[in-house]
Amino acid sequence: MKLEGNIEDGAIIYEEICQACHQPGGNGDPGGNFPQLAGQHSTVIIKQIADIRIGNRDNPTMYPFANIEALRAATEDIFDEEKSGPQTLSDVSAFIQTLPMSSAIVGEGVDLEHGAEIYKENCVRCHGDHGQGDVKNYYPVIAGQNYHYLLRQFRWIKDGKRRNANPEMVKQISGFSERDMLAVMDWVSRQTMIAGDWDSKK
């Protein structure tokens, strides 16, 4: 986390490597196969890629891009050796954090009051009062994330399939019903980030 990201270089890397799946604006896909990355904390992106690289998170599609040597090879025609490898991750994550979030794909909107209640009781301590996450503690932005992606990841965490999940979260959501999951993910997908949410000094 000590490398300082270069946003201009990150934009080039994103266009070359990331946008084919995550879309030019970082908005992911409606079906939830690829998440919205736009606006995500740079620290979270780096941590998740590191977890994929060392095998703490299973994601075969992302693994080639999480491998430092593969990244170095993919960017060697763009940058010199000093700017490839770990610096590539720092640059592209810094760029992604600056991308404006789009309107997310949301759920049916039939149980939002219950979703808000579940969120307030279970999620605020780590993810913030509207899903803004925590840049210093690696809690991701979940506000405005595509509903289908949120729901899929939530199920994987609850079922133990996502192995890098925070153990406290696994315990916290173990008693969630199907209604709880659908409602809270729908509510979260409708939240928006506000000025100051990306501030690492807060």
Image: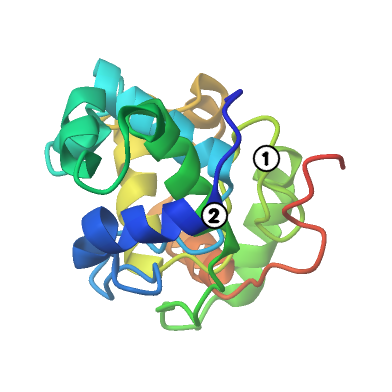
What residue would you read off at disc 1?
A: 135
Amino acid marked by disc 2: Ile
Q: Which of 178 and 16 is in front in this view?
A: 16
Crowd rating for badge 2 (residues with CA inside 10 Å; few <14, some 14–19, many 20+): some
Label number found at residue 7: 2
| Residue 59 visible, this orientation | no
Looking at marks 1 and 2 on the same chain, the residue that comes earlier in the sequence is marked by 2
Q: Nearer the viewer, residue 39 or 189?
A: 39
Q: Distance between the residues labelled 1 and 2?
A: 17 Å
Tell me the SS state at disc 2: helix
7 relative position to 107: left or right: right
At horizontal 47% and vertical 65% (from top left) the residue drawn is: 145
- Which quadrant would the N terminus be assigned to in this image? top right
Crowd rating for badge 1 (residues with CA inside 10 Å; few <14, some 14–19, many 20+): many
Above or below for 120 versus 190: above
Task: Pick out the residue farthest to the top.
Answer: 54
194 relative position to 123: left or right: right
Image position, residue 67 (x, y; %): 22, 27
- Which quadrant would the C terminus be assigned to in this image? top right
At horizontal 54% and vertical 47% (from top left) the residue drawn is: 6
Foreground mark, 1 or 2, reads 2
Please tell me in which quadrant of the rendered image residue 76 appears. Answer: top left
Above or below for 137 versus 118: above
Image position, residue 92 (x, y; %): 43, 48
Amino acid marked by disc 1: Val
Q: Which of 38 and 140 is in front in this view?
A: 38
163 relative position to 2: left or right: left
Tell me the SS state at disc 1: loop
Image position, residue 147 (x, y; %): 40, 68
